[in-house]
Image (spheres, rainbow, N blue to C red):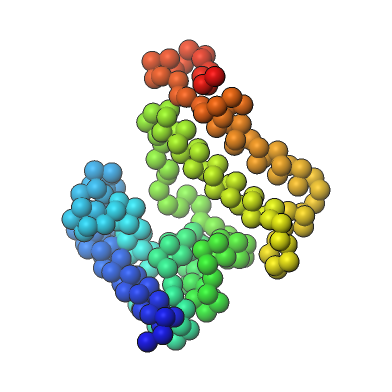
Amino acid sequence: MTAKSNNVSTAIRDLKAAYAIGRKIIAKHGPKKELGLKGLRKLAKSHRVGVDRIRKCRQLALGYTQDELKRFCDLSKTSRRPLGLLILIRLLKVEDKDKRIDGVEQAIREGWSLGEVETKLFGQFARRERVGRKPKLPERPEELLVELEAWCMRWRRMYAQLNREDASDPYVHVRNLEQTVQERLKVAIGAPKKTRDGGHGTAQAVPIEQRGRGRRCRHSP
């Protein structure tokens, strides 16, 4: 077995295992019940996986039938291209089911990465509105700062790739954009850092008891 075939087989086993977990959860708790974080943690512990994995397993089983999953796995085998769980979850945002299935199959045949799914497929088909779970809001200011920093890091990495020195590859570069867009990007890339640092250092959260008093976030000197 070649390395490529092994990757395909591993991906298929992972999908089938995730689907099986999702079906067990639905069979026990029903398709509409909100499990809550406590329930998710309990399931994660019983299945020896993480909470996020439990969520995705349930989404997979709710979003696709067993016949559809088999169809995807068979195409993955014949195309010799692995299909990841996260790609299937992302494609649930396509509202039209027939278009969604076509999109999955196109992603398999062309070997799309997750980024290519986001840019290519969602550029062709309308996204589903109000799909997926709402983001969990942080309970403490310091948790919010950690969350914001994670998003800032993703944005800075994306911009670094767009503004790379070697532009000989076929991918888009900052200089391919209009001048006004380039200027706005420069401003936007600096905003997260200013939000994080405050121009002086690492931002500190305002204590809970000081909320609502018009106090601004304090910064270390």
Picture residue at 33% right of the left edge, 70% below the top: 14
How many dots with numbers?
0
Query: Does residue 208 appear to the left or right of 125 in the view shown?
Result: left
Q: Position of residue 186 (x, y in %)?
A: 71, 42
What residue occupies the far right of the structure in this picture? 179
Tell me where residue 174 appears, x and y as whole percent.
Answer: 73, 53
Q: Is residue 213 visible?
A: yes
Q: Is residue 191 left or right of residue 62?
A: right
Quarter of the image containing the C terminus? top right
In the image, farthest residue toward the top: 213
Q: Look at the image and tell me whether residue 30 can be seen.
A: no
Measuring from the top left, give residue 77's x and y in whole percent: 41, 83
Q: Position of residue 215 (x, y in %)?
A: 51, 14
135 and 160: which is toward the camera: 160
Q: Quadrant of residue 170?
A: bottom right
User: Residue, x 51% and y 21% (percent of image)?
Assistant: 220
95 or 113: nearer the eye? 113
Where on the picture, by quarter, is residue 120? bottom right
Is residue 159 positioned above or below 64 on the image?
above
Looking at the rendered image, the quarter that the N terminus falls into is bottom left
In percent of the image, x 49 and y 43: which residue is there?
150
Left or right? Give the position of 187 relative to 41: right
Is residue 28 placed above or below 146 in the rendered structure? below
141, 59: nearer the viewer? 141
Which quadrant of the figure has residue 165? bottom right
Q: Residue at x 24, y 43 (%)?
A: 38
Reply above or below: 100 against 208.
Answer: below
